[in-house]
Image (cartoon, rainbow, N blue to C red):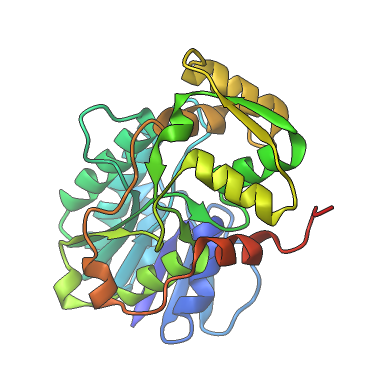
Amino acid sequence: MRVAVVGATGVIGRALVPELAREHDVVAVSRRGAGPPLDRVHRRAADATRRSELETALRGADVVYHLVHSLGAKDFEERDRLAADSVAAAAGASGARQIVFLGGLGDDGDDLSAHLRSRAETARRLAAGPVPVTTVRSAVVVGRGSAAFETIVALVDRLPAMICPRWVATRTQPIALGDVVRYLAGVAGREEALGAAYDAAGPEVMTYREMIERVARLRGRRPLVVEVPFLTPRLSSLWLHLVTPVKAGVARPLVDGLRNETVAADQTIRALVPFRLTPFDEAVTGAVGDEGEK
């Protein structure tokens, strides 16, 4: 098959492109068309919000992956809407048979954060187009470059004590980057996956506090975590901006979304794409190794 990845230079895209290239011809689409040379991979430059550029880049693709997310921009929700509409239309014009979208777990509640609301709206807009959509929804991705995971590692490494808001008691089900990639690659071209939405999660459910404490233990640290009821999402994001590498524009919508539980409601995808899920500790060790341990 000919597979196009829109957002090929993002955290997920960089890992997914070589995985897909094992079996398919891949068109790696990004704003600048940059990336390392790989066998069976063709680099194309296109802005995801511009349908005309996308139609040229996606021409002849059987499957189109939509991995673009404008988190960090002030108008990220509007940009995500434009990108979803452009990808849906361009995929239809190219003759694609499937769009695969990576969304977020927890996007079906009534009290959604702007981040999760945007993910849910993107899925709806893609589905309103002419090409069937397969949605894979994940919680925190454990891997280098993942904003949420990098934030947790930075907190552990930089702070001997943390005053944390109530969201640290929220449950989540983190998943290794490599496992997300295997699920995304595994649904490509599958007739039974057309129009379906799958929950992709790791093998363990934990709170964000437990996640912080587990990462700390693996890093050889024992930070004191104190929960307080009055730290607002805005103050939380500003606090994160001061002590982590994540910019406030990214941190605020991410932190706001942590109030929403992100636990898999079903395990259907595990039967469709069977493999051994990576345990959390193993995923963390693979992502950060011995870097920074003392």
Question: Left or right: where does residue 77 sit relative to residue 72?
Answer: left
Locate residue 147, reporting x and y percent. Answer: 57, 44
Q: From what the image shows, is residue 258 above or below residue 215?
A: above
Which residue is painted at 40% across and 46% down in the image?
172
Which residue in the rendered view is the most extreme toward the top? 230
Residue at 63% of width from left, 57% of height from top?
A: 144
Q: Please indicate, yes or no, whether residue 95 appears anywhere in the rendered image.
A: no
Residue 86, above or below 36: above
Looking at the rendered image, the quarter that the N terminus falls into is: bottom left
- Looking at the rendering, which quadrant does residue 117 occupy? top left
Task: Point out the residue furthest to the right here.
Answer: 294
36, above or below 108, in the image: below
**Image quadrant of residue 136?**
bottom left
Residue displayed at 47% across by 39% down = 70
The answer to whether residue 265 is visible is yes
Q: 210 and 186: which one is in front? A: 210
Q: Left or right? Give the position of 274 relative to 20.
A: left
Q: Residue at x 34, y 76 (%)?
A: 186
Q: Is residue 198 above or below residue 129?
A: below
Q: Residue 60: horizontal and vertical position, in percent?
A: 32, 74
Counting every numbered tag in the picture gives 0
Query: Residue 225: x percent and y percent?
Result: 61, 31
Q: Nearer the viewer, residue 148 or 206?
A: 206
On the rendered structure, is 180 left or right of 262? right
Q: Position of residue 140 (x, y in %)?
A: 46, 49
